[in-house]
Structures are given as C-alpha cells and as structure tokens.
Image (cartoon, grey):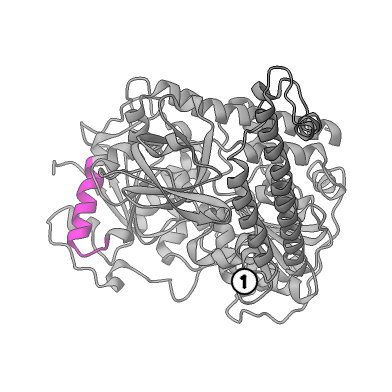
Amino acid sequence: MNLISYISKLKELVELEREAEIEAMREEIKKLKGYEREKVGRAILNLNGKVIGQEFGFKLVKYGRKKPFETEISVGDLVLISRGNPLASDLVGTVVEKGNRFLVVALESVPTWALRKVRIDLYANDITFKRMEENLEKLTENGKEALKFLLGLKEPKKSKTVEFTPFDEELNESQIKAVSLALGSEDFFLIHGPFGTGKTRALIELIRQEVKRGNKVLATAESNIAVDNLVEGLWGKVKLVRLGHPSRVSKHLKESTLAFQVENHKKYRRVKMLRNKAERLAIIRDQYTKPTPQFRRGLGDRDILKLAKKGVGTRGVSAKTIKSMAMWIQINENVQKLYDEAKAIEEEIIKEIVQDSDVILSTNSSAALEFIRDIQFDVAIIDEASQATIPSVLIPIAKAKRFILAGDHKQLPPTILSEEAKGLSETLFEKLIERFPHKAKMLEIQYRMSALLMEFPSKEFYGGKIKAYERVKNITLADLGVNNPSFGSPWDDVLDPRKPLVFIDTSKREDKWERQRRGSLSRENPLEAKIVKELVDKLLRMGVKEEFIGVITPYDDQVDLIRSLVNVEVHSVDGYQGREKEVIILSFVRSNKNKELGFLTDLRRLNVALTRAKRKLIAIGDSETLKVNKTYKRFIEFVKEKGVFVQLTTLF
C-alpha cells in the first residue's frame, strides 16, 4: 500500500472507532435504566453538588450522596452531568477526586440546575479522536517517515552502541544495552519490556542521558498513570513540565503540571490582577441591558453607540434601553481588553516554561496541544507503545527527529470497539519489531515474581529468555508472615503459603458449566465464582491483607458475579494490564460440552493474566475444556509437574 492511501485508511478507521465508541455509550444510556447503568459502574444517580473552590481556571464541584457507590468512573475520566435525559445534556467535566460517597468534578461553568438531584455518567472522549484525525490530516515529514518504515518503503539505519555512564547504578546488563542502542539510533529504536522487567526504569535513564546530550525530549504514554510514573522518576533530576488537565495527574505530582508552574510564575500576579479587575467590571456591566437580538433589532454595536450619543431611540427601542445597551457595550470592551491582556501574558509565561524545560511529558493525545505546536523535539520517547493505536503514537512521533517506542507486543493490544476498525489493534511497535527485529532489544531480568511463576510465561511467550532477579527468585507468601492454613483437604494444599503455583480443576464436577445471562454476550461460571469466594475468605483468615489479593477473569459478567461475593479488587484481564498483586486468583470461566474457548484463544490475554501475581497464583478452570488449546494444555501440564494441581470432586 502506498503512503497516501495508508494515511486515508487510518483516517477512515479512526472515524469508525470514534463513531462506535460514542454510539456504544449512547446506546447503553438509552438501553439501560439509570439504576442499571449505575449497577454496571458507569453512572451514579441522585447526587447533590456544592461548589467547593476553583483550581487552574476550573470550578470544583463536590457531588455526593449518603448511600455509598461502587463505580468504574475514576479520577481523570470525562463525565456527563444531567437531570432527566442524559443525552439532552452537554455539561461535561473531568473527575478530580473520588471517594465511596462523592466525586469532585472540574467544570468550566456551573449552571444552577447542575447542583440538585443530578446523574453523572461516564462519557466517551471525543477530543482524542479529533486530535488523531487532525494529526493525520497534516502529518509532518517525521510522521510520514515512521509510516514508510512500517510499510517497508524505507530501510532504517543500523543502531550503534553508545558508551555512557548510567545515572542509575542498579541497571542490569539488558537495560544498559537497550539504552545504549536507543542513544545510538538515528531514526528509531524499540525497547521490548516484558512483564516486570523495569521498562520505566530504563526509559527514565534514557531520558536523562538524552538531556545530558543537550537534547529536547518529548516523553509520552497512552495512559496518565504511565506518564505519572515517568514524572515520578524524573522529578528533581531534569527540568520538566507535564501537560494535560491537572485533575488527571496524581495529587503529589501537581507541581510538575504546566497549570501549576504557570500559576506560580512571577509574572502570573499581573494575570490574576487583570482577571479580577475584569470580573469586577463584568458585575457592573451586567447591571445594564445586554444587547441581545430581541433588543438590537438588527442594530450593530456602532449604531447603538451613535444613537446613545444622540440620546434617541429607534425601531421600537426606547432611548433609555439604547443608552443602557451602549453602557453594556462600552464596559464589555474594557472587560475584553483586560481578558485579552491577561491571556497574552499567560501565553508568554507558557512559552517561557515550555522553552525552558528539557523534557515535556504528556499522554500521546495531549502532545497535540497548542502549547507545543511549534516546538521541534530531538527525540520522542513513547511508553506503552504496544497498547496505543498507530494514529495515537503518530501524534508525538510527528513532532520529533527520531523516536523510541517501549512496550510488549506479547501482551494485550489496544481495545477496539468497532468490528470494521479492528485493523487499529495492530500497533506500530508490533509491525516494526516484526519487520526489523535488529532494531529492538528485549529486557531480560524481571523484578516482579518468583522464578516458578515466571517460568511458564517465559518459555511460552519469550523463548525462555526472561530470568528472575536474584532477590525475587524464591519469594512466597510465607515471607509476609502469613499463617499456615488449617482448613483440611483440599484447601491446605491449595493455600500453602510456600507453594506459589496452583490449578484447581473443576472438570469432574457436575456443576462446572458456564452460563449466559439473557441478552448478554458475556459468560459467567457460578461454581468458579463460589470457589473464588472460598479462597478469598480463607486467605483473609490466614492473615493475607485485602489489598494484597486480586481476582482476574476474562469475562465482564463473571467480574460482576464475583464482585457481588467478595470485597477485594476484581477486574477483567484488560483492567489488570500493567498491574500486580501479591496473590492473584484467576477464573477462566469457560466450561462447555463443545469445548469452545472464545476469546481465551487470544494468548496475549493469557500472558497478561499469568504475569500479575508476585507470590502466589491460583488458577481455576475446567481442564477438559481448556486442554483443546495447546498452550493451555501445556500450562496445565506444567502445573501438574511443578506446582499444585487439585481436582475438585467433593462439595465444600
């Protein structure tokens, strides 16, 4: 495919996905009653609001109610505020803070109706899609070059190793090699960071080395959490600024944001003074008649001012009204002048901060912000590149002479809702690593999990190249002072704190079958949910802390079912990517006479699920159904050989 038609194809896919995401949200709001949408975690009802302050130009409204709520809505999400029909509202804000009975939302303006008996819905973020489309529309030469590599229209130059003295003395050999080759790449380089291999740490080293060489760095990631992790590691070590809405930034990192740095700049006092003056004038202005169309009757501002000077009325508008409108216009001109002057000074401050920073950090989408439009970066360093679509990573890539992508294409790709836009799930990272394996370096030491938990995924997905760091090699739950179980068979074997890997097989149980709720495409398995509840209860009784336990299951309906039974964190596999827990309980769900596995056959999902646990993994499934897939069969055999395999036959 040639470059022009490929860019057109990308634009088409972005538009399809944008429509699918908005449609999915609208359909769900239409289809589900308010309380049903609250039940699935995407709405909160019966909230009252109170303006509690102002921050970075936004009004902060605290919405709460007496009854606690559980919700998927989290800090940084866009939300729709409404009374009555949500789809008739256009009041959109950003969540700044979250408790179990309240949300604080940042809004540009707060209409009075928005403070009593409102509903808050999770909202689809249209801005991100618009930014991707605009970037593709005006794609720079840097962006086009990246696509030429992807399409095989251009060969990259060989990466050279560059000698450097690491700032971080704890880096291992593979991290040093990856940073060295990234520094020695004239066009691009790929850092392949499997689970727990210190990818962020290597990127922090790379950014610091680039700054040391005098380069201006744009560092981005798909999620705000990943950007925060980079800011955390760089704060106080380089001159940096973090772009994006301050409410999407972790609280203790607020100082890194552009908004915070602007408000604490010495010139900002003048901006504040001008805005306060403008607000005071606006109060005086609003005592006069605003020249709305019903009063203007086709008169322009100049006409009104002339008539006022003469002291006459016209077209059925009295001289008194004309005079009042003239006063409104004159004062409004002064209000606008003050705001314009404040804005000009603010833009000057922003320019100064951005030019003075060695590193600009943002999400891929926020790299499209106006503030950095004219800056040419020496290098773009993009984390989570295997979770971002090509149009998303092209936003930062388009702004830099060279780029470094970090990710793991053996884990989950971006989630795409539109069937027609499935092509977007193929990432630039994956395409480039397949085409140019010599332009990549894999990190080989993992710092997360015990050697036994790591062994199978390493062999199955990474050619056995990953090794456990010496200090984590033999970690178990026993190190945390957990009590030995005394629940009898089979629980004592399953829950033994010294045994990290367990598979509970339900294949001999008559009640093992999965089921589907009416009208749902998802699946649930009541027996497996019951087993999860038993395991969680017993782990807590053994002294394992609630926050140390996580439950993973591939199906949303099973997530709902398990959440109704336990108080620990329960998520789908996708929701756990990039996360870890001391103990993971994994419910595979699928158990049917046809031996169908559905999307369990996407082995990247299995890789993510198996690599979240640090000290203990308990997998639950029907081995007869799972064994039809060779990888699952090998996993079950591996547990039989090296872990604890328990066939559940008796009732509990």
Q: Quadrant of residue 34?
A: top left
Q: Is residue 213 left or right of residue 122?
A: right
Quadrant where the N terminus is found in the figure: top right
Magenta-colored stretch includes residue 535: yes
Which residue is outermost to the front? Answer: 311
Horizontal side, residue 318 vs residue 553: left or right: right
The residue located at (37%, 31%) in the rendering is 37
Q: Residue at x 68, y 17 (%)?
A: 316
Q: Is residue 273 above or below residue 608?
A: below
Q: In terms of secondary structure, what is the magenta stretch mainly?
A: helix
Q: Is residue 331 left or right of residue 103?
A: right
In the image shown, does 334 or 235 lie closer to the viewer?
A: 334
Residue 17 part of the magenta segment: no
Picture quarter containing residue 38? top left
User: Residue 401: percent from the left, percent from the top?
Assistant: 83, 58
Q: Amino acid at mark 1?
A: Leu
Name the residue located 47 percent from the left edge and 41 percent from the top edge.
630
Front in this rendered view, residue 554 or 87: 87
Which residue is more in the foreground, 651 or 279?
Answer: 279
Residue under the point 19% across and 53% down:
537
Q: Residues within 10 Å of mark 1 (few under 14, many from 20)?
A: some
Identify the residue position indicated by label 1 in the image: 234
The span picked out in magenta is 530-545
Residue 575, percent from left and from top: 45, 46
Say whether residue 292 is visible: yes
Quarter that holds the C terminus = top left
Which quadrant of the structure image shows residue 190? bottom right
User: Residue 507: x and y, percent?
Assistant: 27, 37
